[in-house]
Amino acid sequence: MFIRHRKQWHTFVILSPGQYQRRRELPREGPMYFVYIMTNRSKTLYTGVTNNLMRRVRQHKTGNGSGFTAKYKLDRLVYFERFEDVHNAIEREKRIKGWLRIKKTALIVSVNPSWKDLSEEWYEHHQYQPQSA
């Protein structure tokens, strides 16, 4: 994630949930691609690839992402990786989709042991919307 502060660009790298490392660098030119995993309260998993993670997650959360995510109400982003090359991103997505569930779960737990919604703070919440579990 790039943030501009005092005319300098900073990259925040997630080391573990709640622990970030800041690095100063210029934002990269060109597109970025993401492989991500969405889930729900029942821990149904969906793996996808996109060039705009925030937009795609919002689509999933509102039921407009895909038929599968709308049917199973997949509303939590629990894992993502960033790529500069779309071919590498697609290859990684296919590889993860071919894994057994236990291996996907291990991947998620390795960076997000509590299965926290990584997009929780990206969007405004309605005052009557319940807090996510």
Image (spheres, rainbow, N blue to C red):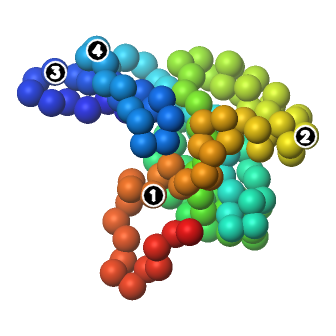
The residue mark sitting in front, 3 or 2, is 2
* Residue 8 - label: 3
Indicate the amino acid at tag 2. Leu
User: What quarter of the picture does the C terminus occupy?
Assistant: bottom right
Contact between marks 3 and 4 (CB within 8 A): the answer is: no
First in residue order: circle 3 vs circle 4: 3
Q: Left or right: where does residue 57 sit relative to residue 98?
A: left
Q: Residue at x 57, y 22 (%)?
A: 83
Q: Is residue 53 left or right of residue 99?
A: left
| Real-space CA distance between mark 2 and mark 4, rounded to the nearest whole angstrom | 38 Å
Q: Is residue 75 above or below residue 6?
A: below
Within the image, what quadrant is residue 110 found in? top right
**Amino acid of disc 4:** Glu
Front position in the image: 36 or 84 = 36
> What residue is pinned by disc 4?
25
Element class at badge 4: loop
* Residue 120 image-quadrant placement: bottom left
User: What residue is pinned by disc 1?
Assistant: 120
For marks 1 and 3, give the CA distance. Answer: 26 Å
Q: 99 or 26: nearer the eye?
A: 99
**Which numbered dot is residue 66?**
none
